[in-house]
């Protein structure tokens, strides 16, 4: 769902950059605070960043001639919260634009807002609600990661609809068209991302027990919370 370089009108590119910027700056402060309080989590943050980069770099053709991809933000959001992923996503998207030609510099703000702001916020809310509702750690992670992916692609569809409203049906019809077309590839990708995120969390629970306990995902003698 990276919007490619130059695809958005200048006014849209500037507006989305302005909207995303405060979240990225808040992410910088969140990372600094987290690592200052819990320096032992640096390696775990590195794992989350690598997971985001690897998954979001998997570029699959879409039926529109564009592409769809996982986001990878679910793991980092569950571990560190949504603000950290705003910063992480902006860095990941910048490197992908420069090195892989995924997305672009002018569309970095829009892509950061969809993948680094909306996706993580929805992921975080769904995960917390699922856990409070008594859902197990695996199902909660799956539901959160899938929801974050879907939220990202719907936000991108809205961004495209705002930039290119349908001549007859306006923004609403354009949104329906973009969302409907991308759903063909994005929904299966969301489910796949959910499963991969569950696998990663299970690995961390098994092999990074002390760090997961520090984050509050394990209590006592290894009980998952």
Image (spheres, rainbow, N blue to C red):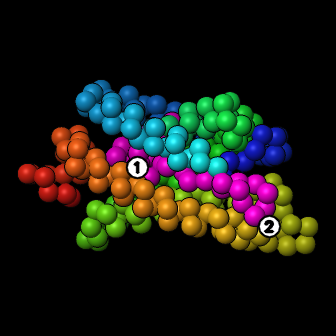
The magenta segment:
60-87
The reply, left or right, for residue 202 in relation to residue 20 is left
Toward the viewer: 96 or 32? 96
Toward the viewer: 86 or 26? 86
Whether tag 1 and tag 2 are in contact, CB under 8 A, the answer is: no
Q: Residue at x 65, y 45 (%)?
A: 111
Q: Is residue 60 above or below residue 105?
A: below
The residue carrying pointer 1 sits among few (fewer than 14), some (14 to 19) or many (20 or more) residues within 10 Å by Cα, namely many
Pointer 1 residue: 75
Q: Is residue 173 above or below residue 125?
A: below
> Quick check: is 68 in the magenta stretch?
yes
Residue 174 got which mark?
2
Q: Position of residue 218 (x, y in %)?
A: 19, 51
SS for callout 2: helix
| Mark 1–mark 2 distance (CA, rounded to whole Å) | 32 Å
SS for callout 1: helix
């Amino acid at each position: 769902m990276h919007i490619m370089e130059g695809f958005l009108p200048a006014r849209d590119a500037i507006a989305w950059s302005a909207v995303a910027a405060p979240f990225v700056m808040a992410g910088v402060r969140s990372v600094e605070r987290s690592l200052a309080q819990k320096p032992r989590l640096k390696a775990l943050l590195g794992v989350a960043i690598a997971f985001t980069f690897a998954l979001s770099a998997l570029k699959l053709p879409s039926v529109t001639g564009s592409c769809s991809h996982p986001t990878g933000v679910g793991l980092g959001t569950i571990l560190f919260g949504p603000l950290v992923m705003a910063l992480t996503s902006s860095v990941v998207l910048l490197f992908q634009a420069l090195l892989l030609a995924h997305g672009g510099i002018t569309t970095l703000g829009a892509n950061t807002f969809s993948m680094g702001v909306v996706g993580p916020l929805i992921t975080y809310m769904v995960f917390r609600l699922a856990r409070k509702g008594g859902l197990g750690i695996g199902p909660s992670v799956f539901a959160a990661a899938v929801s974050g992916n879907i939220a990202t692609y719907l936000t991108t569809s809205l961004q495209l609809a705002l930039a290119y409203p349908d001549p007859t049906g306006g923004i609403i019809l354009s949104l329906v068209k973009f969302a409907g077309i991308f759903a063909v590839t994005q929904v299966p990708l969301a489910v796949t991302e959910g499963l991969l995120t569950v696998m990663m969390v299970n690995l961390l629970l098994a092999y990074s027990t002390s760090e997961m306990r520090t984050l509050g995902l394990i209590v006592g003698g290894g009980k998952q919370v």
